């Protein structure tokens, strides 16, 4: 008999939103190497701010880790964001022309970035470790899932190829596997009410992932919020 996994149930419950996220038109243009560099620059201007809040959300989860093994998994997750992804995003931003405010820590969140990060921080601050994992997993998991197939035929543009490398290797897959396994260990798959609650959180985060891609792809102002809709800093 195949073992039932809560993480798989959450993934499947929001499959339509998930599919639209990992196959987003912006992702397809990155894969083809046809995305304008200025659009990618706008993505990084917001993603640096997002990742800083994301790291804070994971930090909140560390305080709710139920045991030593959970501490280890969440610490590795936090280190990946703080020591690898934030510096890499800043480096990509610099290669694409930079942004003085973002690099100095004074960037302004787009309303979409603000809404997504408030969702993550609220769940991780007020719910238990399993609920927090359901909130933060769609970001980590979807990036691995969208990048892995692109490793076989990376675009010629070195910026896009390097970005795919960041999420498409075995090491990143292992991190995702450890995080999903932790969620599976913490939740009884037969507790239908609990699984349904977590599925709602997971799908909301997945919808925010898609909205973030929409924002980055469609913004004509390089990812900056409109002047009359200031996004707060975390």
Image: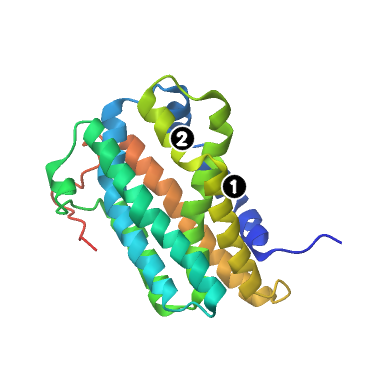
Question: Image point 53% across, 45% down: which residue?
Answer: 144
Q: Which residue was labeled with disc 1?
A: 16
Residues 61 and 211: in front is: 61
Q: Quadrant of the C terminus?
A: bottom left
Using the numbered discs, state the Cα–Cα distance from disc 1 to disc 2 in whole angstroms. 23 Å
For marks 1 and 2 on the same chain, the one whose residue lies earlier in the sequence: 1
Residue 225 % position (x, y)? 21, 47
Q: Nearer the viewer, mark 1 or mark 2?
A: 2
Q: Which residue was labeled with disc 2?
A: 164
Horizontally, residue 97 falls left or right of residue 147, namely left
The answer to whether residue 149 is above or below residue 208 is above
Q: Residue furthest right?
A: 1
Residue 155 % position (x, y)? 46, 22
Asked if residue 166 can be seen in this view, the reply is yes
Horizontally, residue 205 falls left or right of residue 83, namely right
The answer to whether residue 30 is above or below residue 129 is above
Residues 23 and 158: in front is: 158
Horizontally, residue 5 falls left or right of residue 221, namely right
The quarter holding residue 5 reads bottom right
Neighbour tally class for label 1: few under 14, some 14-19, many 20 plus, Cα within 10 Å: few
């Amino acid at each position: 008999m195949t073992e039932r996994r809560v993480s798989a149930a959450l993934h499947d419950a929001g499959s339509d939103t998930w599919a639209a996220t990992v196959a987003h038109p912006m992702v397809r243009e990155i894969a083809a190497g046809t995305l304008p560099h200025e659009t990618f620059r706008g993505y990084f201007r917001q993603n640096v701010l997002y990742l800083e809040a994301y790291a804070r959300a994971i930090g909140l989860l560390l305080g709710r880790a139920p045991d030593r093994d959970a501490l280890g998994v969440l610490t590795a997750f936090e280190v990946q964001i703080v020591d690898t992804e934030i510096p890499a995003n800043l480096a990509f931003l610099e290669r694409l022309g930079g942004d003085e405010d973002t690099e100095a820590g004074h960037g302004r969140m787009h309303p979409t970035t603000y809404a997504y990060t408030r969702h993550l921080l609220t769940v991780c601050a007020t719910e238990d470790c399993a609920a927090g994992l359901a909130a933060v997993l769609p970001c980590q998991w979807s990036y691995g899932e969208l990048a892995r197939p692109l490793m076989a035929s990376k675009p010629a543009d070195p910026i896009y190829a390097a970005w795919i490398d960041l999420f498409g290797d075995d090491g990143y897959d292992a991190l995702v596997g450890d995080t999903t396994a932790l969620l599976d260990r913490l939740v009884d798959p037969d507790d239908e009410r609990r699984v349904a609650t977590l599925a709602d959180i997971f799908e909301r985060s997945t919808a925010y992932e898609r909205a973030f891609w929409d924002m980055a792809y469609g913004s004509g102002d390089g990812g900056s919020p409109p002047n009359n809709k200031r996004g707060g800093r975390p």
